[in-house]
Image (tube, rainbow, N blue to C red):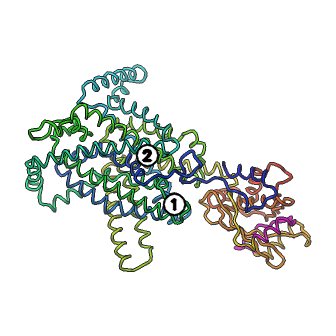
Amino acid sequence: MNPRGQWMIERAGHRTQGMATLPPPKLPSDSSPGSKKPAEEYFWLWVVCLLGLDYFSTLAYQPSITYHETKLLGPIATAVVVLVTLFGALPIYCHLAARSPAGAGAFGIVEKLVRGWRGKTLVLILLGFAATDFTMLKSMSLADASVHVLNKHDGDRQQIARAFAGWCKDCAKDYLSDEAATHINEQLVVTIILGVIAFAFWFLLRRGFTRKVTAVAVPLVALYLLLTGILIVGGLFFLGNHGDIFTHWLDEVVRGGIGGWSTLVLFALIALPKLALGLSGFEMSMILMPQVQGVAGEQPPVTRIRNTRKVLVAAALIMSVYLLGSVTVTTLLIPPPAFGPEGLANNRALAYLAHGGPLVAGDQATLLPFCGPGFGAVYDLVVILMLALAGTSVITALSVLLPSFLMRFGMEFSWAQRWGVMLILFAGVNVLITVMFQADVEDQRGAYATGVLVLMASAAVVTLIQKRRERGSSFFRALNVGYFGAIAVVFLATTLAVVMQAPGGLAIAMCFVAAILTTSILSRAWRADELRTIGFEFKDEQSKFHWDNLRHAYFPVLIPVDLKRENHEEKEAQIRAQHHLSPEVGVAFLEVYVDDPSEFLQNLMIEVVRDNHRYVIKVTHCVSLAHAIAAVALEMSLHSEPPGLHFGWPEKDMLSASWSYLAFGEGNLPWKVRELIHRAEKDPNNRPRVIVG
């Protein structure tokens, strides 16, 4: 419910109560979308599984991407990714967990570090990159799921997919054009079908990460890690029994003309931007933080912070071990031709091993005795479910993240959450992206990496700024600043490299940023005439005592005054002269101080003092002069005759006054106050009067 509607209910049902007792309307929180209840909390290990839907699912395609980019250097390059994960990303997000326990992550800290419209704009830009990150993850996950569906080990699947794609091409020729038909292929058709099927998971995830979602995610992730672990351990045992494979790889890498270890490390560092997808998942951990079990009422939530750090450490360690193991096994055991565009291991290297694909050498036909069509089909099914749920879960996370900020910035999302409009919208965007990239996994990873790295770089910079502002020993502070400064440089350089290599990702992100900024501006302008006041607080008991006296006495005149331009004596003399008020008429002055006009909702702080024979009402923590004045006048009219608001004649012209009102919460005061009062109070007899002289 919007603040104006809430005011009308309170005005109808609480006429005999004071201002401080009015319950504020529900504000956006970290609760699940579409629900006003707090987010459900789970044992930290179960949250690891929720995070794993996003984070661990990248194992399905990361080994293949690593081989495409680094060939035999894959294990060494992956070791660099693991080091950046454990000693770069992990410390950053452990720090953010302590500084933003509500789950806002770097977004919330940026909003605090940079106040006003600049801070809001930065947050909206970062939200655009978050939308890019999560949207591209879903699109890429479904594309790789289609690769597993179109298992080239299984000719029957290929035949069915080819026949259906041919039918779709014929339909495109008949109803669209021949050119449109040329863009249709088996993978695109299967990806769109999987997207439609995955959208059915919306009924499971539409209320957020509930216990039903956990009941599905925990066994699925556990089974996925078990089967993948079997393949990795089996591969390592195979390498142990066939030492010549490792020796041959080492000769090729170190003594095969590539160079010494220093050169290898340099090549691995250069390859880091291309392997950045192995770092994805940390931003999702911040969104899931409200789901981590804590102690009810604990402030600060030390237990939740500690358990969230357990989630981060466990997820990072599991992913590091699995990623390094899977890349090592696939790079050393799978023949290079299998990674080619038409190869059986392309974008499904672990599934290739599960299906019993031929290895580079050895007297054993398959990795493990049970690897073959049966085990491979089971592994394909588990991977497809993981990838489909990964895409749906991140869009659900996005539908939690966006409203938590945008509703406070002035956008109304309750109807969109109730009907799942956001999920439908992002599903449509995913279809467009899938068609644009032809469902090609390789083509999409640059755009995905852009979103991931911009968010991680911003988190690193935010952490560095906070470390610089921390108090304590100068020596340890310098160490902290140096360490986190180096991490920030790594992430910023990696981000810049990815943007230069794949500018299309930045273009997609800018489209999201432009859409969010435009929608925010239009929505704020549309809702500018809502009352926007959610509650009141008193500075002290004396203020409350004076307020009670004021609201039950009859003070027919409220005079808004700006002490920067005039004092009480001059203003009172001016108003009495211009409005023909006799000395017997009691007046009260209203001083309103705008805090941050970029905020949309306001919770007013009231201080009432006596200045000689006058009452002075000082209002702070407001975002707009007009809204604060209207709210105070409406409250006073609850317990006495409606007061009159007496203004002097405004000096600004209508256009500049309206712009000042929208952007800075000032200007156009008499007209805007009158309009707000008329919208909030339908009974003319109960409306405070606005008088301009």
User: In this orientation, which residue lies closer to the viewer: 524 or 268?
Assistant: 268
The residue beneath circle 1 is 295
Q: Is residue 147 in sight in this rendering?
A: no
Assign a secondary structure to mark 2.
helix
Query: Residue 628, position in %: x, y?
Result: 71, 61
The residue beneath circle 2 is 394
In the rendered view, would you say 389 is above or below 589? above
Q: Is residue 547 magenta?
A: yes
Assign a secondary structure to mark 1.
loop
Which amino acid type is marked by label 2? Val
Q: Quadrant of residue 365?
A: top left
Which amino acid type is marked by label 1? Val
User: In this orientation, which residue lies closer to the viewer: 37 or 536?
Assistant: 37
**Of the residues tagged 2 and 1, which is closer to the observer?**
1
What's the residue at 37%, 23% (across, down)?
A: 168
Query: Residue 302, position in %: x, y?
Result: 48, 65
Query: For this view, does 149 lie left or right of residue 392?
Result: left
Q: Which residues are magenta?
A: 544-566
> Within 10 Å of the Cα at label 1, are there few (<14), some (14-19), or many (20+) other Cα atoms?
few
In the rendered view, would you say 321 is above or below 141? below
Q: Which mark is residue 198?
A: none
Contact, CB < 8 Å: mark 2 with mark 1? no
